[in-house]
Image (cartoon, rainbow, N blue to C red):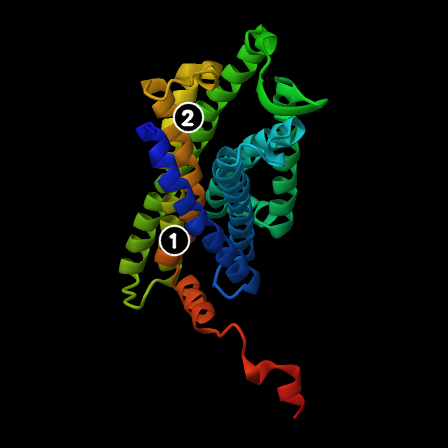
Amino acid sequence: MYRPPILQMEDICYPILAVLGVPANLLTIIILSRENCGLSKCIGAYMMIMAVSDLSVIIINVVLYEILIKRLPHTSLHHTNFLMAIVYLMAVSLELSQWYTVAFTVDRYVAMCCQKFKTKYCRVKTVRILAAVILILISLENIPHLFVFQPLRIIGNISWGIKFKLEAFNSPAFVAFTRLKSFRDLFCVFGSIFLFNGLTVRHILVSSKSRRIFRSQRSENRRDTEMESRRKSILLLFSISSSFMLLWLPATVTHFIAGHTMYSDRDYSSPAYIAAQTGALLTQLSSCTNTYIYAVTQTKFREELKDIAHTPVFDPGSHPCTASE
């Protein structure tokens, strides 16, 4: 039976994403919970919430929807209420991944460029409050997704599957809702990351130049540990931001151009459908990359990763009975 190339690509890529993404994000959460990575508590808190949001994307969007629901058509997974809840959670989890990345970018800007405000803003308490506020706002914003679907069919008084309500799909309110979200994603999310990264770079270049002049005047030859720490922070920030923008840009641009009509196109050979599905795949790939970025850019993270890899699952020396003997 012929299967379109875009579906063949999904059949291969999504299981790979699940195999790579779930263990990677779980390992990140375990390593960060140990607090031995040499990171500030604020950076560690942001990395933790990003790892949790990335793990939720892999579980909900990739494992549940792309692998199980799409490939098990005649199961209870296709109950209408369950599908509507999954579609809602998919939208929420993806947007949380977006805005937590923006929040991390702003935090690094404040930490490096706003020394007077740094002590008040760059705290774990602030991270938790901001994460909770973003979660509540995104959850409320996506409530309309629960009202634009209807059952695909009803069998024995039980609703199965979902499809767009025609009246909702063509309503000015829904069109405005999707347009505003696509505008916000393209200009607010990407614009914020570009803006704050640009301001951070400008500040670092100016301060680095002043610091080099000051040290040369004092004839200091020892290592500048502060500048090394800044370089590591900048490398981490830019690696996360660059990966995010590269992987999210195709889906964001496609959604901005096509709007809500991208949801109705099911022509597997059409450029619009291929662009939409490829963009969706790349956004979910972005939920797998942070762990590998940490491993490349953070020496102590690599050491913790190696420590976990060399730790046996069952260590007889640590067993209570062995210890008591």
Between the residue at mark 2 and the residue at mark 1, the CA separation in whole angstroms equals 24 Å
Residue carrying label 1: 292
Residue at x 48% of width, y 63% of height? 37
Quadrant of image for the C terminus: bottom right
Q: Is residue 110 left or right of residue 125?
A: left
Q: Please tell me in which quadrant of the rendered image residue 252 appears.
A: top left
Residue carrying label 2: 252
Q: Earlier in the sequence, mark 2 or mark 1?
A: 2
Q: Amino acid at mark 2?
A: Thr
Residue at x 56% of width, y 57% of height? 41
Q: Please tell me in which quadrant of the rendered image residue 96 appears.
A: top right
Residue furthest to the right: 157
Task: Give the camera-side residue of 276 and 49.
Answer: 276
Secondary structure beneath dot 2 equals helix
Quadrant of image for the N terminus: top left
Residue furthest to the bottom: 325
Residue at x 31% of width, y 30% of height? 5
Q: Identify the disc placed on residue 246.
A: none
Q: Please tell me in which quadrant of the rendered image residue 147 appears.
A: top right
Q: Is residue 150 above or below residue 284?
A: above
Q: Position of residue 245 (x, y in %)?
A: 38, 35
Q: Position of residue 230 (x, y in %)?
A: 39, 54
Q: Is residue 143 left or right of residue 33?
A: right
Q: Position of residue 204 (x, y in %)?
A: 36, 46
Task: Give the camera-side residue of 175 and 197.
Answer: 175
Q: Is residue 192 above or below residue 155?
A: below
Q: Is residue 162 left or right of residue 185?
A: right
Q: Position of residue 7 (x, y in %)?
A: 37, 31
Q: Amino acid at mark 1?
A: Tyr
| Label 2 CA crowd tier, 10 Å (few <14, some 14–19, many 20+) | many
Secondary structure beneath dot 1 equals helix
| Label 1 CA crowd tier, 10 Å (few <14, some 14–19, many 20+) | some
